[in-house]
Amino acid sequence: MRPAHSAALPSAAPVPAMRLLLLGVGFAVLDVYLNVPAFVRLSPVAWLGLYAGFFPLAHVVGRLSGAGGLGKLGLALHRGWGRNLLLGFVFCAFFWALKYVLLWALGAFRVEGLRPAGDIALLAVQAALAMFLSSATDDVLLRGYLFRHLSGALSTGALVVLTTVVYVVNHVWYVHLDVQSCLFLGLMGLMFALALARTGSLWLSIGLHWGGNVVYRFYDGFDAQGGVLRRVPMPEAAWQAGVKFAVTLLALVAMALLFRFTVRSDREGPLSARG
């Protein structure tokens, strides 16, 4: 958000039709590219290569569409970017771990032991690298790209709502969108969008996204191979979804405290909306 004196700025103008067209085409290209794994089974190496290749592609698409390169899309290394990334990671990892601890304590699953140390080490490396790429690419496309293109035309609140809705709808590639999943995804999308609006860059949002995803992979693993724990799940019950929703909502509320320790980008805010 802009400082208080920005209220004197003229009201935002509509985005020209050609800019909207370029925005839509660029978004479609990047979104289809990111979701290739939804249609084509890839090896882990190919999957990582695909996601790593997103960044130069996004840089080119961003420049061609008038948004600018990766720095303008929210990845500029401003003062405190590493702090924001680390704080976001620890914050969301804590709350996701809390969620699974509560599920275990309330009887959602029984723990029978740990996976072999070698399997845990491999899972840790896979989770750290793969989930960073997954989180960062998602944030660049669904938040950085849209905020950058539309910040001159929409208010911060409108951008937060828009990117949250797009985040939920974009999961149709992977998730059956029922009321429960939409509510859960909506809370997460709201967390990530507010993080961007608060700091003016993507690093806090990426950290939040990354931390939650890493803990999820430690819990559930990859490709149904199981996570760190050898666990026996109990029959799914409605209260389990309630626990997940409540902890996610608690994390969203607690972000007010997190924001006290984050650093706002000291660069001219290409991702900061008027109003």
Image: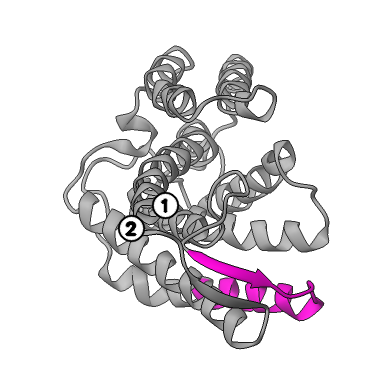
Q: Is residue 69 magenta?
A: no
- Amino acid type of disc 1? Trp
Q: Is residue 148 or residue 135 the one in the foreground?
A: 135
Q: In screen coordinates, is 117 left or right of 150?
A: left
Q: Is residue 203 or residue 154 the one in the foreground?
A: 203
Residue at numbered disc 2: 3
Secondary structure character of the magenta stretch overall? helix
Q: Which residues are magenta?
A: 229-251
Residue at numbered disc 1: 210
Q: In screen coordinates, is 117 left or right of 47?
A: left
Q: Is residue 138 or residue 17 the one in the foreground?
A: 138
| Residue 211 image offset from top left, x and y in percent | 41, 58
The residue drawn where x is 30% and y is 73% is 260
Q: Is residue 207 or residue 154 the one in the foreground?
A: 207
Question: Nearer the observer, disc 2 or disc 1?
Answer: 1
| Residue 70 image offset from top left, x and y in percent | 34, 28
The image shows residue 52, relative to residue 200, as above or below, that is above
Residue count near mark 2 (Cα–Cα under 10 Å), binned few <14, some 14–19, many ≥20: few
The residue drawn where x is 42% and y is 48% is 127
Q: Secondary structure at mark 1?
A: helix
| Residue 74 image offset from top left, x and y in percent | 36, 38
Q: How is the image coloured?
A: one colour
Residue count near mark 1 (Cα–Cα under 10 Å), binned few <14, some 14–19, many ≥20: many
| Residue 19 image offset from top left, x and y in percent | 56, 19
- Amino acid type of disc 2? Pro
